[in-house]
Amino acid sequence: MLPSIAALTCALLLGQEGGETMPPAPAPPLQAEADQTAPAPLPQTGGEPTTAAPRPQKSAAPVLPTQKWEGIHYCVDLPPTEQIPSGHYAAECDSAKHECRVAPLNELDASGTETDRPLERSQGCVVSQSLLDTLGEYRLLPATASAPPGWYRDEQGRVMQFNFDLHRRIWLGGAWAPRWVEGGAGKDNRVRADFGMDFEWPQGPSRLHRLTLFDTAVYLGDDSALDATMLRYEFRTEEHEPLVRVTTFLGEPARHDIFLNLGVWTEAMHLEKVRRDGARADFLALSTVHASLDLWHSRDLVSYVRVRAGPSVERDLTGRQLTLVPGAALEGDLTLDRDGFHHLRVEAEVEKVLLSKTVAGRVARPERLRLHAGYEAILLAINDQPVSLVLDGRGTWRDDLAHVPARWEWSAQAGLRFSLWAPVRRSAPLAGNGKG
């Protein structure tokens, strides 16, 4: 693990343990402002030549410490070695301990030899003449270069993302989606293709906005169907003043605060094409506005359990009429781990169609009931873009289809989803020593 740096450290330690510390050599002149991206050359700091040091066995090498992302990194030139011929390093120095953690400025190959690829997602380094003048008094320790929150840098200096925000992404997916209709002849063989865009941003510590565009699921096969929403927007809040204060007197008096965390959930242009038993029906919800109440949410407002209710103006494209559809839902959206690898979503929604004209073969005020439970887990990442496993269970009961009896239909769906853009979560931690 970085054999050249370990060899350099051994040589410097041997030189220091010999009981004689060499004074710092005269400092080179400070480079011009335009040339400060290249570290100033540094003379030998003492000790035996580093190129003659034995190469340590990889199995015996200790785990290297990681430089701090928040710290200042200084450009230093150290004696060139076979593995690091440029001698260019970034140093994180502790003046109280008189030691510096040093890491190469370029990536290494599998054998530990320097390449011509600069470190990606690196803070870079700055030139400090005062440090260069006194570097001979510091003990140098090999280290792994720092990486930003949500990213990990391996021993070769390569970075990889280990933390993902699946509420900010563009996704494409596909799944096997068979369907069973109650009382039907058997299974309908279908596949699902889905895509969409998710965005999320906070407004201070107590409000969160979410926007979804072109959320689309296309079902192909037996009785093909479509469910697409052009736009969905919501915001949720966290109140700091309780609506109701309840005090109990069983034992010691205890106060319990009840907060009213309200929000708004809206949809525009939700198109549903339903196919069942040869019947066809198309519904376009022009606009939906629900008020929401969080029963629970995480500190960052990302995960929640809530209820919402409100009206929708819907166009029955098959019956050529405009209807009012009030609805209500109980739903939960949970990120189950710190790094965003596991997500669980559950929903139960009910709707009732009002102000509808009489349609032959259909009840006057149709109803719909939808159940959904879904789990998504990231399996791997390609170019730091996650590929996830998606498992869905869905159930629908409805009596809004003319000449089709009301009954349940069930679907079990399993597939993969590729996220084209999924940055780190806002709460992403720093990696250390190879672990997130």
Image (tube, rainbow, N blue to C red):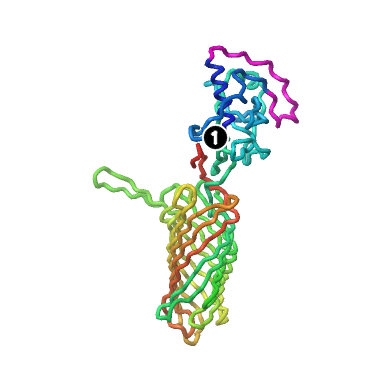
- In this rendering, would 37 be left or right of 242? right
What residue is shown with label 1?
A: 1
Residue drawn at x 53%, y 81% is: 280
Coordinates of residue 398 in the picture (x, y in percent): 45, 76
Coordinates of residue 116 in the picture (x, y in percent): 68, 38
The extreme bottom residue here reads: 360
What are the residue bounds of the magenta stretch? 18-41
The vertical placement of 143 against 265, above or below, is: above
Do we see residue 93 in this rendering? Answer: no
Which is more toward the observer, 117 or 364? Answer: 117
Q: Name the quarter where the N terminus is drawn.
A: top right
The extreme top residue here reads: 20
Coordinates of residue 309 in the picture (x, y in percent): 46, 65
The vertical placement of 1 against 292, above or below, is: above
Identify the amino acid type marked 1: Met
Quarter where residue 170 is shown: bottom right
